[in-house]
Amino acid sequence: MFGNLGNLAGMLKSAKEMQGQFAKLQEELASRRYEGEAGGGMIRATVNGKGTLVDIKIDPQAVTDVELLEDMVKAAVAAAGAKSQEAMKSELASLTGGMNIPGLSDMLGPTQTG
């Protein structure tokens, strides 16, 4: 009977350790930068590890067709966001030992892509 309490205490300790690692990962992801580009590099978007757009660069030569420019901006932001999402998934997999914990990626904060 008391053996089960020992298991519970161990599980709680492990959960607390993972919570600390998770908080550290959140901070680290916020400081990372991922770049996506479109139009042969004429448009460059940068997002942080949480998928929030932090910078965008537009080559003046890309401003000849506004509709095309809008499409290229969306494509560059989407590409940067995809890189951010892949990095987050990889980091979460290493943190959880590959276990799929439903809702865990949502706890890192909403992504701003797509």
Image (spheres, rainbow, N blue to C red):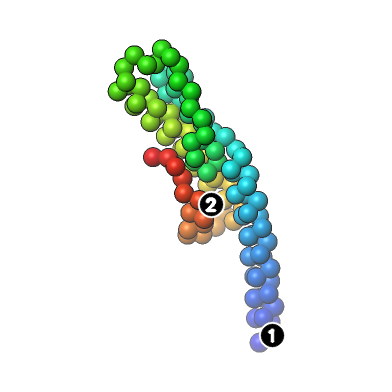
Query: In the displayed structure, does residue 33 sit left or right of residue 59?
Result: right
Asked whether residue 100 appears in the rendered view, the answer is no
Mark 1 residue type: Phe
Quadrant holding the C terminus: top left
Name the foreground residue: 27 vs 10. 27
Q: Residues within 10 Å of mark 2 (few under 14, many from 20)?
A: some
In this rendering, the answer to whether 23 lies above or below 113 is below
Question: Residue sitting at 32 percent across and 20 percent down?
Answer: 66
Secondary structure, mark 2, is helix
Secondary structure, mark 1, is helix
Q: Which mark is residue 108?
A: 2
Total numbered labels = 2
Instruction: Point out the residue furthest to the bottom here.
Output: 1
Q: Residues within 10 Å of mark 1 (few under 14, many from 20)?
A: few
Question: Residue sitting at 64 percent across and 70 percent down?
Answer: 11
Q: Position of residue 29 (x, y in %)?
A: 59, 43
